[in-house]
Each structure stands twice: as structure tokens, then as C-alpha cells.
Amino acid sequence: MTIGATLATAAAAYPQKTAFAMGSRSFSFSEADDLANRFANALIDAGVEPGSNVAVIGQNSLEYAIAYFGIARAGAASLHLSTRMTVDEILHCLDAGKATFAVCDPSVGDIQITNRLSLDPGEFTTRCDEMSDSDPMKEAPLDTPSSASYTGGTTGFPKGGMHSARSRLTWATIALEFFDLGPDEVMALAAPMGHAAGGFIWFQPGVCAAATQVILPHWDVPAFMDAAERHGVTSTFLVPAQVRMLIDHPEFDPGRLASLRKIVYGGAPSPEGLIEEADARLPDCEFIQNYGMTEIGPLVTLYKKDRDKYPAAIGRPTERTECEIFLESGAPASIGEVGELCFRGNTLMQEYLGDPEQTAAFFRNGDGWGWTGDLAVRNEDDIISLVGRSKDMIISGGLNVYPEEIERILAELPAVQDCAVFGLPDDTFGELPAAVIVAADGTTAQDIESACEGLIARHKRPRRIRLVAEIPKSPAGKVLRTVLREKYADE
Ligand code: AMP
């Protein structure tokens, strides 16, 4: 099986069935299969070579779904950049990924790329109409690079984790098993396809399951309720922040979600009590939590029976990969002992694009084990719980924010003498970035906030800024983020 073949197989089995629906438009599996060939031919016609990297920058759309399969059938790898990235971040990712072609939403600004194809439905259709509908038969072997998803970078820029097709198809197999997905499912795609979770824990597995997918361009509770009711949505993937927004929304009406049987949630820690509350408000819906990571895949799940016993756990690992908790020394942790959660197997990324140093740090011992940065313990029932993050990463609304990255930008502001960024708990987003700043006389927090606009992507911008006389640091000069988190948690 190849990536392209997953769509062709679904089209052969269910040609007339709706594959993707968005608003009033939809494609059957047969139409989607045909369009993916046409788009592959459009890419080849534009000069895309097998083995090259093609960036995709767009909100969820029918065209995005087709572009993904078209790129695979043209023999290229797809780099899934986020529409939230700043132009500088996009330029960095294009450069690190050696991408000379980009398939973009019309709203994406000037990214200085000459080979640009549009995801605008009109332009996309016109381009496809001009092309042959036969498969160009250029798809790459299973172990060559196939697709990259991006995650926050400690180096100040997003890092692209490149996976082979074998890895993505194993992710899909695991998702089908963990979430029990099949052709009767009507899956709402409410997470961005550009993110590993939306694209590869939900969208690609949905095609492998030959399920119908209802695509939401972006997260919006009333639109989700409408789509669920209209299409009889049976399952969806949400980050915990979306679960919170859903059940707190004034238009939330369980009666309109009567067809919904399954919510898979994950991508970030769930605030205490959130899932119990959601479970009580949607009693006919099963809540399945998944722990995953851009670099490793969807590897740990927690079902209700274990959640009742261990509410704060992330669950049990799949048997399709090796899972171990290692101490800093490299020795395996015993039951109950805290170490770093590590995985090995064919769901792991091949590399961070253009970043051999970070790649080497991830596969730090050169023995195939990937180190997640998550500190964890395993209990006697083989259930894993996270206890912290070794890298102090902030996860806001399911998106990673690295304090060091924001600190570097803040430090460049003329008024900033010293600064530290850390995460504070937030009921909606899980965490929000906050900052303490030692500033030049006469500077206000408002001045700093205004200076951040345009420099820092919205979800990474510190929401709470405090001006302080001094920043707590260890004798070695490291910022004591734990002290900051505790001190400002209740303010
Ligand atoms: P990303 O690769 O950007 O999706 O971020 C992956 C990180 O998100 C992991 O290393 C964890 O720290 C966190 N994460 C993902 N899923 C969960 C989960 N179900 N519970 C707690 N944290 C999670």
C-alpha cells in the first residue's frame, strides 16, 4: 500500500460514497481519486520532480485533501506548514525543507516562492480540468520521505518532522485500531490538517477506513454543531481546549449532537475534571484520549475503564512500537520511577528537516530510540502518566510554544533588559504564555504588548506581562520557571 493507494482502494470499494464534504460541496471517493490524479499531473506539468518537497499552506479544505494525495502521486513529499506561521517562519521552513513549490490558500501573503499553486476552489478546479485523470505512477517507495508536520522549535523556528509513507501508514493502522474506525464512520475534521494530529491521526486514517469526512475550515462551535447535525457526524478529534470551548458554548446542545458516538482528544494535557464534565454532558459519547507527538505518532491511548481508575494518566502504549521510560543515565526506569518517555519503531520521524543537530538530540544515543522530552512514570498496570516536560514547553490550545523562542524575540526589544517566559494554567487554552520583564525606566507592560504584535505569532504572544526588578535564576544562571509558574499562577 502507498499513500495514493489508500485513496484508490477506498474509491474502488465505495466509488459513489462521499469521501469529503465541506459546506454545501463534496467529493465522492471516485471524484477525489480522479482529482488527485489530475492534481498530480498539474504538479508534474508545473515542474515538480519525484523526490522533491512541496509545501502546503492552507486551512482545511476539499482542495487541501486532494492536494495531499496529488503530491504523493506526483512522487513528491508534502510539507504541511501552518497558516498560523509568520512570513519569516514560512520562509525558514521552505528553506530548511528545500521546498521550491508551494500549494497555498490565496490568503497566504508574499512568501517569495516562484512556483506557487492555488488552493482557491475555482483556480484549483480549472487547473485540474486541463489535466489527464490517469495516475502518473510516480509514487515513491515506502521508506522514502513522504510528509512533514511542524512543531514548535527550541531554536526559535518551527521544526519539520519528516516521516516516510511507511510511518504514516502505520500511524493510520494504529489510529484505526485505537479508535475503532471503519467505513460506517462520519468523521468531523475539526483539527488543522497541517498539524500532525489533524492530518495524520485523523484525516489519513479516515481515508484508510473509507469513512466519510466532514471538513471544517477552522474551529467554530456553531459550525461544528451545524455540520454534526447535517451530516450525522459520528466521531471527531479535538484538543482539550476545543472540548472546553464546545461544552461551554452558549449554543452547545447535546440534542443536536445525537449522532456523535466518539470524541478522541489529545495533543495536550487535559485540565483536571474537563473530560468528566464533558462525559456527563454527552453521556452517549465515548471519550478516548490519545497521546501523540509530531515526531513519534499516536502511540498511547486511555479508555474510560482505565480513566475511571487513573484519571490523570495518558494510558497504554500500542504494541506496534517499543515504549520505554529511560533515566537520564540511559537505564530503564522501574515501575513508579520518573524518567523520559521514549519510543522506537517505524512510526518515528526520519529527521527534522535541515536540522541535523536537533535530529541527533532527538535520537540522542543513535540506537533508534526517540526521546520525547516528556517526563513520565509507568504503574504496575502498564499505564503511563506524564509528570512534566523536560523542556518547559508551553502547550496553548494544543500548539507548542517554547519559552526560549519568545524570550529571544523579547530580548531584542530595546526596552527589555531581561526577561523570562513561562506557561500559566488557563481554563480554555490549557496554558497561556506569560512573561516577566526587567524593563528600562518608563516602559509599561502595554508598550511591550504592542511591540510583540507583528513580531510574535498570536498564539505565542505573552498574554500576561509583569514588569519586575529581577528574574529568579539558578546559580548556573538558568531561569527558574517553576518558581515563576507558582508565583504567578493565581494572579
Ligand atoms: P506536538 O508534537 O506539537 O503535537 O506536541 C507533542 C507534545 O504534546 C507531547 O510531547 C506532550 O508533551 C503533549 N501531549 C500530546 N498529547 C498529549 C496528551 N494526550 N496528554 C498530555 N500531553 C500530551
Image (tube, rainbow, N blue to C red):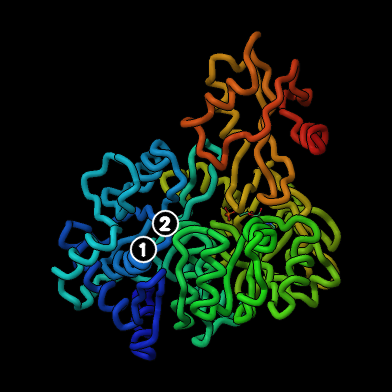
Residue type of the residue flagged with mark 2: Gln
Quarter of image, res 194: bottom left
Tell me which residue sits at (81%, 53%) in the image: 338
Q: Nearer the viewer, residue 228 or 467?
A: 228
User: Of helix, strand and loop, which one carries label 1?
Assistant: helix
Name the quarter showing ligand 1: bottom right
Which quarter shows the N terminus?
bottom left
Q: Which residue is mark 2?
A: 59
Quarter of image, res 484: top right
Tell me which residue sits at (58%, 76%) in the image: 235
Tell me, yes or no, whether the two marked residues, 1 and 2, touch with CB atoms within 8 Å. yes
Q: Which residue is mark 1?
A: 64
Residue 246 locus on image (x, y percent): 64, 62
Q: Residues within 10 Å of mark 1 (few under 14, many from 20)?
A: many
Reply above or below: 257 against 462. below
Q: Nearer the viewer, residue 373 or 454?
A: 454
66 displayed left or right of 398: left
Tell me if residue 130 can be seen: yes
